[in-house]
Image: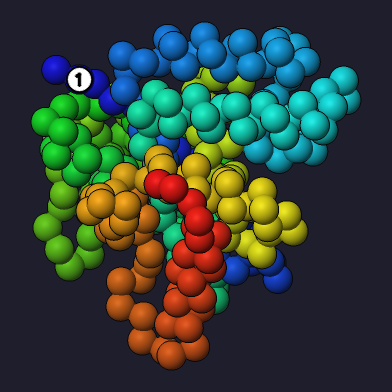
Amino acid sequence: MKMYLLLTDETNTEPKPKAKFFAYGGLVVDLAVLPEMDRRIDGIRQNRGYRRGDALKFDTNTRSGHVHVEDATAAKNDVIEVCISLGCKFIVYVVLHEIAKHRTSAELIAWGANCVIGKFNYFLQVENSYGIVAVDRLPSGSEYSFLSDKFSFGLTFPDEDAVVLDRIKLFTSTCANASHASSAMDISLGAFRYCINQPLNVPAAKTMMANTCRMLWAERQGNTLYPSELGLVLRPKDVKLDKYKAEYKALIDHINSLLVDAKL
């Protein structure tokens, strides 16, 4: 029976003119291909000038001084290609900052983590498999209490029955440079974040979005993907104000515009 690993992280925790949406993402990796992912990303690091201990992340500014910008960009593209070729899946939760403006960053991250972990548990049900969850550090070092709560009680809601996360057999935390898979997670989420936030380099964004959508957990009918409520989770489900509905429609239209001519 297959086992899967879910690595998670957040981005755009604070609203900015070009960051209207908070996003929390998860990369799903078949444990059977993890050694191959490790080997290939290690090779990318060596080929692109990364040394041991250097951060390989989406944000080019995190690179060490001896890594050229062109090599950092190429390394990110190489990592995405590795994820696609190994059959990794991507799940992302998105909420408009304006709607969530009265919530703290900690609350936003907890909601995003709950949603992505819940979708992962559903993915495991569909695949008749089991999995492991590894979350990135949470605010104020709260990851251990959060993970203990998920394992013991599942997803809890004020007015609904709890959702037992019966397919997830281990909850743990991780951090940057604790695995090459963590780099893959950061780069996958970073590519999605770049694409939805008025990218300066539109041709690059088109390629990134096409590649990200290749990983999105989705139903497929011919060349059309249907990721809603699977790999792409927009919240809240019921948007009441027209101005907020317009923001979500603009987001979907923007994503679709980047996918024009993409062969998925």
The residue closer to the viewer here, 47 or 203, is 203
For image coordinates 17% across by 67% down, the residue present is: 159
Q: Relative to residue 256, is residue 46 depicted above or below?
A: above
x and y, in percent, of residue 73 in the image? 72, 34
x and y, in percent, of residue 128 in the image? 11, 31
103 horizontally vs 214: left or right: right
For image coordinates 64% across by 17% down, the residue present is: 44
For image coordinates 46% across by 74% down, the residue present is: 248
Which quadrant is the N terminus positioned in? top left
262 horizontally vs 223: left or right: right
Residue 53 appears in the picture as rendered: no
How are the residues colored? rainbow
Residue 18 appears in the picture as rendered: yes
The local secondary structure at tag 1 comes to: loop
Q: Residues within 10 Å of mark 1 (few under 14, many from 20)?
A: few
Residue, disc 1: 2
x and y, in percent, of residue 5 in the image? 34, 26
x and y, in percent, of residue 255 in the image? 50, 62
The residue closer to the viewer here, 116 or 251, is 251
Picture quarter containing residue 201? bottom right
183 horizontally vs 158: left or right: right
Residue lying farthest bottom? 242
All told, the count of numbered labels is 1
Picture quarter containing residue 55? top right
The residue closer to the viewer here, 81 or 174, is 81
